[in-house]
Image (cartoon, rainbow, N blue to C red):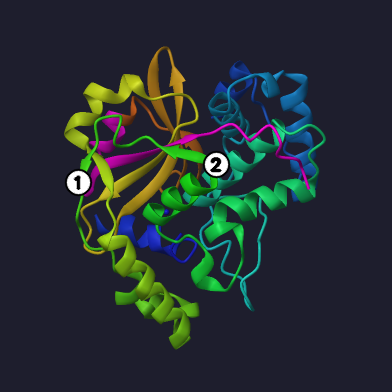
Amino acid sequence: MTYPRRNFLSKAVAFGAMAVLHRSGFARTATPKTDEEIFRAALQHARESGWAGRPIGEAVALMGQRFLTSPYVAHTLEAEGPERLIVNLREFDCTTFIESMLSLARCVKMSGASFAAFESQLRLVRYRSGMIDGYPSRLHYFTDWIADNARKGTVANVTRELGGTARSSRISFMSEHPDSYRQLGDPAALAAIRSSEHELTAAERWYIPRNRVQDMQSKLRDGDLIGITTSVEGLDVAHTGMIVVRSGQPAFLHASLSGKQVELADGTLSSYLQRYRTHDGIMVARPREPELNERPR
């Protein structure tokens, strides 16, 4: 979820384990590092561990687990000045977490990928058509994010094929709460966001109601990116994370507002959904392999 990258999500939520790391092989050092150093260490570990030969979804899930216990921090994309690409591998909100892990995993699959290539991948998944053109070009709503990334080929929207049903709720939260978004003080930006909301509301979209998730969750795979849909008026999705399959069961790995860190939720995805009254279902984006002719930049 982004909002404003992403106080949108913290508002939606308001509405409504180091020993383990050592045992799992994902222990992290306590030494502060720059984003580029973190990137290089992550790729080196991934390549030495043979992740490049695994399916992209497994690489996403493994990379996500490498960042367990990273701090949750909201609003990291809300810098002063014009919209620009912000890279932050030291701390995450729920959406920057899945964007960063998908981008890192795609770099793992690209021989010789540099930090600049990672920045290129992050720009690709975060912005409409992979281009930065002001605040409205950021994919604020997960409905928009999943559709645009499906067009770009970074993910497949598998919600319908996994048993999803059509949804027709109105998407309007940002334009109805412009005072919560500094950038929407610009009338042109507000008009662009409102236009995007109208298009999203009118478009065909799908979700899996939470009372069906338990019966279908065995179909979920490592690295599936999950948007948790919400009954909050005007919102499509209130939280995001990814699937990590453990002992055959789909656990939910996410940057947790309540836990203040990246963590694996106890139990399965279905049991996680039951904790929150306004969490009413899921959307599922399945990572796709980079094209064979795609090269790092």
- The part of the image, by quadrant, that contains residue 202 is bottom left
Q: Front-most of 163 and 220?
A: 163
- Disc 1 marks which residue? 277
Q: Position of residue 145 (x, y in %)?
A: 45, 53
In the figure, 83 relative to 163: above or below?
below
Q: Is residue 296 magenta?
A: yes
Which quarter of the rendered picture does the N terminus lie within? bottom left
- The part of the image, by quadrant, that contains residue 175 is bottom left
Which labelled disc corresponds to residue 296? Answer: none
Point 56% across, 55% down: residue: 126
Q: Nearer the viewer, mark 2 or mark 1?
A: 2
Dot 2 falls on a residue whose secondary structure is loop
User: Which span of residues is magenta-colored?
Assistant: 270-297
Residue 291 vs residue 284: left or right? Answer: right
In the figure, 14 relative to 207: above or below?
below
Point 76% across, 42% down: residue: 296
Which labelled disc corresponds to residue 154? Answer: 2
Taking the view exactly as shown, the residue that stands out farthest to the top is 247
Q: Amino acid at mark 2?
A: Thr
Q: Position of residue 216 (x, y in %)?
A: 26, 24
Question: In this rendering, does residue 257 appear at all?
Answer: no
Local packing at callout 2 (Cα closer than 10 Å; few below 14, some 14-19, many 20+) is: many
Q: Position of residue 105 (x, y in %)?
A: 64, 34
* Sooner in the amino-acid sequence: mark 2 or mark 1: 2
- The part of the image, by quadrant, that contains residue 225 is top left
Q: Amino acid at mark 1?
A: Arg
Dot 1 falls on a residue whose secondary structure is loop
Residue 233 vs residue 65: left or right? Answer: left
Q: Is residue 229 magenta?
A: no
Taking the view exactly as shown, the residue that stands out farthest to the front is 293
Question: In this rendering, does residue 168 appear at all?
Answer: yes
Taking the view exactly as shown, the residue that stands out farthest to the left is 211
